[in-house]
Image: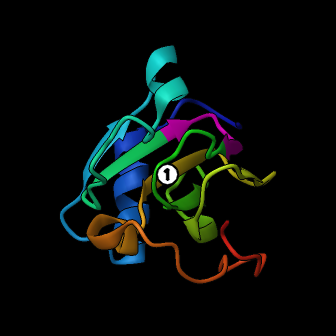
Amino acid sequence: MRGPCPDWERAAAIAARTLGWAQVDIVVARRFVDRLLGMAMRIPPDERAVMCFPACRSVHTWGMHYPLDVVFIDRAGNVVRLCRNVGPGRVLYCVDADAVLERAAISAASSYRRQGPCDVCGSRAS
């Protein structure tokens, strides 16, 4: 969390374009309640909805009903770490991150199934 507060919508949009996430709706979670609930209340899952958690280096998936794609970004919107299909009950952390993006995993939007390991750590989402 270095330097002045960036434009988080812009940083999130840069990261989304880098990942090939087309036509997403970015919501920056600035209020406590938005940060607390995150994606948990978005049922059914919508792969177009992306939540951005500024000034954040860790997230949890407790209470989730479907897997998430979790992206740690820096202040400029560069992807620092990407974990796909992260299931419920997990805690993810990245010391180099300045913000976190979450969206429903593509497989969740159509079937609620979890698939594949994390791109970085290799662990299976469970």
Q: Which residues are magenta?
A: 53-59
Please name the amino acid that badge 1 sits on: Leu
Please name the residue that numbered disc 1 is placed on: 101
Residue 112 picture location, percent across and down: 39, 66
**Which residue lies at the image location 53% right of the left edge and 80% below the top edge?**
115
Colouring used for the render: rainbow
Whether residue 90 appears in magenta in the rendering, the answer is no
* Residue 26 visible in the displayed image: yes
Q: Locate the C terminus by quadrant.
A: bottom right
Whether residue 56 appears in magenta in the rendering, the answer is yes
For this view, does 87 lie left or right of residue 19?
right
Q: Examine the image and state in which quarter residue 121 appears.
A: bottom right
Q: Examine the image and state in which quarter residue 22 appears.
A: bottom left
Q: Locate the N terminus by quadrant.
A: top right
Q: Which of 43 and 92 lies nearest the eye of the viewer?
A: 43
Measured along the vertical axis of the image, is residue 82 above or below residue 117? above
- Name the secondary structure under disc 1: strand
For this view, does 17 lie left or right of residue 116?
left
**Which residue lies at the image location 44% right of the left edge and 72% below the top edge?**
113
For this view, does 79 lie left or right of residue 16?
right
**Which residue lies at the image location 52% right of the left edge and 46% below the top edge?**
64
Q: Residue furthest left?
A: 23
How many discs appear? 1
